[in-house]
Amino acid sequence: MNTLVKDTIEKTQWFAHPIDTVWNAITETEQVSQWLVPTDFKAEVGASYSLKNPKDNCDMVRGEVLEAAPYTLVYSWINETCKEVVTLITWNLVEENNGTTLKMVHSGISQYDNDTAPDMIESYTGGWERCFNNLGEILS
C-alpha cells in the first residue's frame, strides 16, 4: 500500500428530501444512470455492474454490490486499466433536520502505484464532485 498518498475521498451533503427519496436515487438503475453515467447497476448483494461514460475518454469501471442494507450501500469499484486494485464505495444515509444527509466514502485509492495514485485521487475527487452536483439536480 502506498502510505504517502491519501487513501479516501469523502463527500457529505444534506438534501431537503426524505431518506427514501435519496436512497432510491442512489440505488435505482434509472436514477443512478442519470447522475452517474449509464449503467446496469442493481442494488442487490452479489450483483455485478459496469459503467462507462460514453461522452468522454474515461475507463470502464466494474464492480460488485457487497452490502445493500437500508440506507447503507457498499460496492467494489474496479477500474479496467488497473484490475488488480479494488477500491470501495460506501454510501450512508441519515435522516436529520427534516431532510437526509448523504455521506460517500471512496476508499482504498492508495493501492494504486506511486505514479498513478495521485492522479486517481484528483480524477475521482472531480468525478464525485460532478456526481453530487448531478444528484442534487435530479433530486430538485
Image (spheres, grey):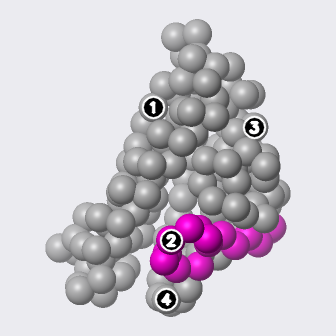
Of circles 4 and 2, the one toward us is 2
Residue 105 on the magenta span:
no
Q: Could you tell which of marks 4 and 2 lies nearer the N-terminus? A: 2
The quadrant of the image that shows the N terminus is bottom left
Q: Which residue was labeled with disc 4?
A: 81
The quadrant of the image that shows the C terminus is top right
Q: Which residue was labeled with disc 2?
A: 56
Real-space CA distance between mark 1 and mark 3, rounded to the nearest whole angstrom: 16 Å
- Rendered image quadrant of residue 127: bottom left
Q: Which residues are magenta?
A: 46-60
Q: Which residue was labeled with disc 1?
A: 13
The image shows residue 95 at horizontal and vertical percentages of 60, 21
The image shows residue 44 at horizontal and vertical percentages of 82, 57
Number of residues whose C-alpha sits closer than 10 Å to that of mark 2, classed few (under 14), some (14–19) or many (20 or more): few
Q: Secondary structure at mark 4?
A: helix
* Whether residue 7 can be seen here: no
Evaluate if marks 1 and 3 touch, with contact meaning CB atoms under 8 Å apart. Answer: no
Real-space CA distance between mark 3 and mark 2, rounded to the nearest whole angstrom: 26 Å
Residue 55 on the magenta span:
yes
Identify which residue is drawn at 49% across, 89% down: 81
Q: Which mark is residue 24?
A: 3
Of circles 3 and 2, the one toward us is 2
Real-space CA distance between mark 1 and mark 4, rounded to the nearest whole angstrom: 30 Å
Q: Amino acid at mark 2?
A: Asp
